[in-house]
Every structure is written in structure tokens, then in C-alpha cells.
Image (spheres, grey):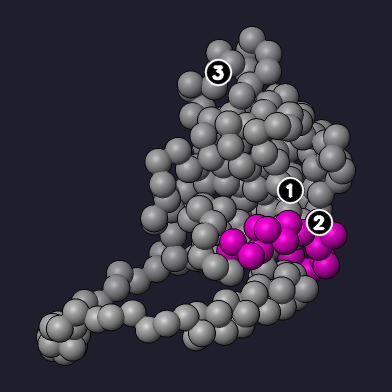
Amino acid sequence: MNRTPKHHPTESTLLRFAAGRLPASHALVVAAHLEGCPACRAGVRAAEIVGGALLAEMPAAVMAEDALTRALARLDEPASKPAPPPPARDLAPGVPLPAALRDLAVPRWRWMAPGIHRIALDIPGAAPGERAYLLRVAPGTELPEHGHEGEEITCILSGSFSDTTGTYGPGDVAEMDEEGDHRPVADAGVPCICLIATQGRLRMRGLLARLIQPLVGV
């Protein structure tokens, strides 16, 4: 992503990210955006500094009597070697895997519908009902109209899409909640590749979309 993003996470989302309060899947999407957005990185750093200062002013917690003994015992335990991360690969020609995803197992694209492919991601620490996936949509392809049971956050990695809220290009973030419906359309040019995190299931509009929803798992 060599373009300066025009659409950013909300201030509330960035503050929750800095405080470690975002759902694990949503935090991954924000991390992907931060890779190409100096302004949001600076905002997160400022929030972390403020949070650290507030923690420093809090009264000290009373520790258990055996806390030091248990801590020293853990230092003597043999260190386990973490499994090596899977090799990074491009999602498409000229579209590298975001650094935020490089420690994850990222399978191959799976056909979802004409012009639409998906990669479901297994996110460590994700709560029940959270979903994260990569979506590749061919130029000109329209996704079914849908709403959301919870918050959805999307970071565009390549290409662009448009809906009633605007046009989103590489590095941009789109946020939706349970009050909004939309029907994204991939713009002309190259396929639109997005990293998406959702809470709950999508509320599909239209009979055909509702019929295939159990088959595609969204």
C-alpha cells in the first residue's frame, strides 16, 4: 500500500486499539491499516503514552506473598521454541501479505460466488462470533446487500470499492455497525482485495443471498 489513506478508523476505534480493548480480529484489521498510515500510528502512540501515564499514577496493587518465588521459578523453566511462521506470500501479483498476517496460517483463495473469492483466517484469541477473512472481488462485481449483527471493519489492501458511504481505496478503512446496510461494488481496474473482521453474522437482504449464506459461512 503506497497510497496515503483517506478513510481512517474512528477515534474511538484507535483508542480501543491502543488500550488493547478491541476484539482480536478487529485489532488485526487496524494493525494492517497502521502499516500504511503514519497519522494513525502517531495517534496510537500518543494514546499509549497517555495510558501509560495514567497507569503510573494508579495505586500499587498488593502482591501475593509467594509472587516473587513463583516468578523466579518460572525463570528456571526451559524456554519453548515458538513454531516458525509460515512463509509470506503475495495475495495477488504486487499485493504482499500485510505484516500483521505473517504469523498466521493463510490458506489459498476459496471460490465463494462468481467473481468473489475468500480466505477464512483463524485468529488466536478471537472470541466466539468473531470472524476475520480476506475477500477478493473482481472489478465490477456487486456484493449482496447486507447488514450486520455487530461491528464490521474493513481495510482495503488493493483495488477499491464503492457503496453509499463513499469510495475506499488501498489503505482505507470502512466501519459499519448493526444500524447500517450497504451493497459494496468493486470498482473498475484491478480486483478489490480487503481484510475484513465482523462480529456475529451478516444480515443478508434478498432470498438468494439468504439461501447461500449457510454454504459460504458468513
Q: Which residue is mark 1?
A: 174
At label 2, the amino acid type is His
Q: Residue at x 56, y 13 (%)?
A: 211
N-term mark: 2 or 1: 2
The tag on residue 86 is: none
Query: Where's residue 28, x and y in %?
Result: 55, 59
**Residue segment shown in magenta:** 1-17
Foreground tag (2 vs 3): 2
**Marks 2 & 3, CB-CB < 8 Å contact:** no
Q: Which residue is mark 3?
A: 212
Nearest the viewer among 61 and 164 is 61
Query: Where's residue 66, x and y in %?
Result: 13, 83
Label 3 secondary element: helix
Q: Residue at x 60, y 56 (%)?
A: 29
Nearest the viewer among 51 and 197 is 51
Residue that extends furthest to the top in the rendered view of this protein: 207
The tag on residue 7 is: 2
The part of the image, by quadrant, that contains residue 15 is bottom right
**Which image quarter is the N terminus in?**
bottom right
